[in-house]
Amino acid sequence: MKTRIVWMRQDLRLTDNPALYHATQGSDAVIPAYIHAPEEAAPWAPGAASNWWRHHSLKALDHALKKRNSQLLIRFGPSLDALQKLITESGASEIFWNRLYEPQLLKRDRQIKQTLEQQGIRVHEFDGALLYKPGTVLTKEQKPYRVFSRFWHTCQQLGLGEPPLPTPSRLSPLTLASENIETLGLLPDIPWDHGLRQSWQPGEASAFETLHEFCDTALETYDSGRDTPGKSGTSRLSPHLAFGEISPRQVAAAVLNTFIDHTAANSSRGAETFIQELGWREFANHSLYHFPYITDQVLNKRFEHFPWQHDECLFSAWQQGKTGFPIIDAGMRQLWQTGWMHNRVRMVVASFLTKNGLISWQQGARWFWDTLVDADLASNSFNWQWVAGCGLDAAPYFRIFNPIRQSEKFDPNALYLSHWVPELAKLPTRWLHTPWLTPDEIQFSSHVHIGKDYPLPILDLNTTRKRALNLSKQLPMAS
Ligand SMILES: Cc1cc2nc3c(=O)[nH]c(=O)nc-3n(C[C@H](O)[C@H](O)[C@H](O)COP(=O)(O)OP(=O)(O)OC[C@H]3O[C@@H](n4cnc5c(N)ncnc54)[C@H](O)[C@@H]3O)c2cc1C
């Protein structure tokens, strides 16, 4: 009897899952196994919001497997011990998994593969999380790209590759004992997850629904709509992609099919821009593969000794959405309540923290890591460094987002602001972007008192901007 184990990690789906699909070809029994070993990802063990998502995603996967006469086998780590025990219990001689590229996990997987192979177990690795395998998109000199446009140009020449794989048709019942998902302790002890429950439905089925709804309603206008945080102009697929509930290949295929069905010029621009966003996800992941230290250290050595400051008062106001700048506070509250923030606002809050506040990008990235349901080590580290000016192809340090201008431009009717900062909603729209400038008589007639109902600005934008610009002038020259 040929029994195979599929070690499921960040690929919590049945369709277009290369490891699962290939394991089912020519086998008698397939054991889909999840091993809980968050400490193996240290110092980047998943944060609280990710744990919440993982709990529900594992449940959804187990449910989908049960509908196919199988189930998800859950065990506690360490991963190698759990796999070896599983091999003994099941008599399996082969293990299948999809590769991970986070530095700690890549190292762990290499060690596990080597040990298992020495014990006569065949290990089959596949790629299912990205469109292009890291290490395969290189310059003519066989070096990693440092500029997105060139990286993406080369990717486009490579094409999108094979179409997505189907759901395996043959899965078998499990006879081995499994832990219960509840025992993994992924849900919070104090129930702070109300907003997450209201905002999201983790799992593969929901990922597909989200994708199709996006293609039907927002893809055509994505090019112009993606920068408006008050409207649903983006896909909100990021947590589904982060947990591998859907593959980027499936997303790209659906987007291209929609485009072929609607040949209007807008639809072409929308599809092109959207697939390019998937390209940024690729670029971030390839960068992490080539420069694994980017999670903690700057990519641009000019910033190695940058004088970041410790200001717990400012950091805490930023975390809680109490800085007195409505766009910053709206974004940080959206993050806290739903585990997600609109991309435009992510850039604005990150710029505010690192440039106006001079608080290190690492401190901001840690907070995002704990609170984002889509926390992804590559995208998070890459984008924080990008905004702070010290990353690859980064926004120059002297480009400092002005929160007021950003708010006026991208949320002109203050829909986003009044939703997430409701204590200001009674003010006339024109004062919502700069509530501290609201004349006293308007504060009085609106029953909104700035400084009492909503904080005064925690810092002066002009002074802090000048301070950041001065510091940027003092950076050592590029070598
Ligand atoms: C400071 C900062 C931190 C971030 N941290 C993360 C993170 O931890 N995880 C994460 O998935 N994204 C992160 N992003 C990127 C981006 O904000 C989110 O991917 C996006 O907001 C997700 O929403 P969406 O699915 O509706 O995106 P859409 O606009 O619908 O884009 C589709 C997909 O493209 C990818 N994508 C889009 N923009 C980017 C980008 N700039 N970098 C990488 N991938 C991108 C995502 O997978 C996204 O789901 C971060 C951005 C910033 C500025």
Image (tube, rainbow, N blue to C red):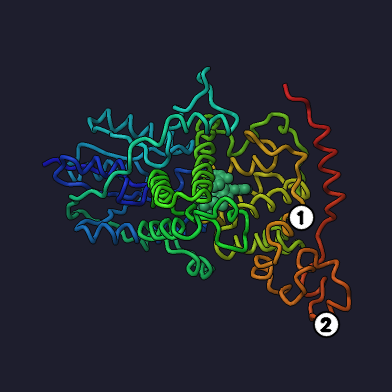
- Tell me the quadrant of the picture where the C terminus can be found: top right
Compared with residue 354, is residue 300 higher up or lower down, i.e. above or below? above
Give the residue type at disc 1. Arg
Compared with residue 146, is residue 226 higher up or lower down, i.e. above or below? below
Q: Earlier in the sequence, mark 2 or mark 1?
A: 1
Farthest residue in the left direction?
A: 1
- Circle 1 Cα neighbour tier, 10 Å, few/some/many (<14 / 14–19 / ≥20): few
Q: CA distance from mark 2 to mark 1?
A: 26 Å
Q: Is residue 303 visible?
A: yes
Residue at image point 74% right, 59% down? 408
Examine the image and state in which quarter residue 160 appears: top left
Of residues 414 and 265, the one nearer the viewer is 265
Q: Is residue 365 visible?
A: no
- Tell me the quadrant of the picture where the N terminus can be found: top left
Q: Is residue 431 left or right of residue 282?
A: right
Mark 2 Cβ inside 8 Å of ligand 1: no
Of residues 77 and 220, the one nearer the viewer is 220
Give the residue type at disc 2. Ser
Q: Identify the residue position indicated by label 2 in the image.
A: 445
Examine the image and state in which quarter residue 26 appears: top left
Return the mark for residue 405. Answer: 1
At numbered mark 1, what does the secondary structure look like: helix, strand or loop?
helix
